[in-house]
């Protein structure tokens, strides 16, 4: 395993080719909660959207520290980017439009149809992960 920067070309290219990662939050009793999530990213943050009343959202409002893992593998090889960071909830119209457009561009028109437009709807929680520590594992670390 080796550490790197989030804005490195390797991390950015790897994340661009992936659709789902696993988000880990901390429950009130200290136990972990890990959930698969769609995500978008740019060179300094990862964006995610969730139902506003989900347990993971409640967890992050109490403790903004999260882990996010994106992995893939075949034929006995595994590649993995492990991200530790902190969450910021976003409610501005401009960010909801910007991140909403990223989701629609990445995941398709059905997102726009589901949301009734290109912006993340107010009924959904929009949050950004600010990466603090990035590790590469498996073949990415060689």
Image (cartoon, rainbow, N blue to C red):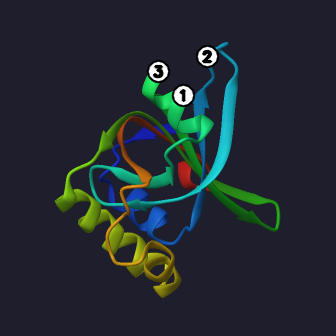
Of the pair 138 and 35, the residue shown nearer to us = 35
Q: Is residue 61 above or below residue 48?
A: above
Split into 4 quadrants, where in the image is the N terminus? Answer: top right
Residue contact at pointers 2 and 3, CB within 8 angstroms: yes
Q: Quadrant of residue 19?
A: bottom right
Q: Nearer the viewer, residue 134 or 46?
A: 46
Q: Is residue 134 above or below residue 74?
A: above
Residue 135 in sight in this render: yes
Q: Residue at x 82, y 68 (%)?
A: 75
Give x and y (percent) for residue 28.
Answer: 61, 16
Identify the residue position indicated by label 2 in the image.
Answer: 28
Q: Is residue 107 left or right of residue 26?
A: left
Crowd band around label 3 with a 10 angstrom C-alpha radius: few (<14), some (14–19), many (20+): few
Q: Position of residue 107 (x, y in %)?
A: 50, 77
**Percent of width and height locating residue 22:** 62, 48
- Residue at the disc numbered 1: 59
Mark 2 burial class by Cα count in 10 Å: few <14, some 14-19, many 20+: few
Q: CA distance from mark 2 to mark 3?
A: 8 Å
Q: Are marks 3 and 1 in contact (CB under 8 Å)?
A: yes
Secondary element type, mark 2: loop
- The mark found on residue 101 in the picture is none
Along the polypeptide, which appears first: circle 2 or circle 3? Answer: 2
Read off the residue under disc 3: 62
SS of the residue at dot 1?
Answer: helix
Question: Relative to the observer, which residue lies in front, 138 or 23?
Answer: 23
> In the visual, does 132 lie left or right of 69?
left
Q: Residue at x 20, y 59 (%)?
A: 93
Confirm or deny contact between disc 2 and disc 1 (CB under 8 A).
yes
Residue found 25% across the figure and 66% down from its top: 98
How many numbered marks does the figure carry? 3
Inter-mark Cα distance, 2 to 1: 7 Å
């Amino acid at each position: 395993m080796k550490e790197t920067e989030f804005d490195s070309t390797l991390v950015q290219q790897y994340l661009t080719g992936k659709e789902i990662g696993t988000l880990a939050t901390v429950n009130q009793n200290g136990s972990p909660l890990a959930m698969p999530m769609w995500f978008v990213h740019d060179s300094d943050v990862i964006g995610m959207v969730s139902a506003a009343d989900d347990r993971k959202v409640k967890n992050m409002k109490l403790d903004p520290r999260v882990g996010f893992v994106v992995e893939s593998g075949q034929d006995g090889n595994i590649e993995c980017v492990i991200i530790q960071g902190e969450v910021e909830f976003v409610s501005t119209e401009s960010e909801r439009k910007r991140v909403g457009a990223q989701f629609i561009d990445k995941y398709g028109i059905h997102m726009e149809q589901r949301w009734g437009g290109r912006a993340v709807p107010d009924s959904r929680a929009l949050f950004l992960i600010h990466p603090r520590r990035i590790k590469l594992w498996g073949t990415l670390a060689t």
